[in-house]
Image: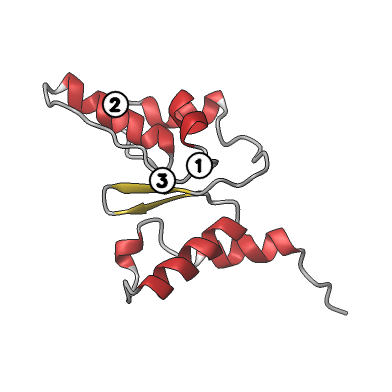
Amino acid sequence: GRRSKGRSAMGAEKAAAVPDDLTKLSSLEPDAIEAALKSRFEGDKIYTNINSLLVALNPYKSIPGIYSSEKLASYTQYAAQPSEPHVFAVAADAYRGLLESHSQSLVISGESGAGKTETSKI
């Protein structure tokens, strides 16, 4: 018989169906954005782009490899385009802008306990 898939496997499949950049959704209504973020969150994809904005959701758990040196290296190659949204991509883009003599500003906003301090340490 068929074996049922675990919760994380189902979450990963649903998250794969949601684009990394939510501006590519067919609807940008709040309910559609919330459903997309929930689907990505359930698949341990805590970072999502909305155009140049990075939305980060606190997973309240450790996600293996998310801040590994290998992951960092994939975002620090100057010509490379990141494969998925990540705080490392934001930092790399800001650094590239500085190298090209463009002023940079980063705004980190969120509710208390959302992970702003931890994210800014990375």
Q: Element under label 2?
A: loop
Which residue, as the protein is rendered here, is positioned at the far bottom? 1
- Mark drawn on residue 112: 1
Q: Residue at x 47, y 24 (%)?
A: 121
Q: Element under label 1?
A: loop
- Residue that numbered label 3 is attached to: 85
Q: Residue at x 47, y 27 (%)?
A: 72
Q: Residues within 10 Å of mark 3 (few under 14, many from 20)?
A: many
Q: Position of residue 22 (x, y in %)?
A: 35, 62
Q: How is the image coloured?
A: secondary structure
- Residue that numbered label 2 is attached to: 78
Q: Residues within 10 Å of mark 2 (few under 14, many from 20)?
A: few
Q: Residue at x 37, y 26 (%)?
A: 76
Q: Nearer the viewer, mark 3 or mark 1?
A: 1
Q: Position of residue 53 (x, y in %)?
A: 30, 48
* Residue at mark 3 to residue at mark 1: CA–CA distance: 23 Å
- The amino acid marked with disc number 3 is Pro
Q: What quarter of the picture does the N terminus occupy? A: bottom right
- The amino acid marked with disc number 1 is Ser
- The amino acid marked with disc number 2 is Tyr
Q: Is residue 79 visible?
A: no
Q: How many dots with numbers?
A: 3
Marked residue nearer the N-terminal end (2 or 1)? 2
- Between 106 and 9, the residue placed more toward the observer is 106
- Between 88 and 111, the residue placed more toward the observer is 111
Which residue, as the protein is rendered here, is positioned at the far left? 101
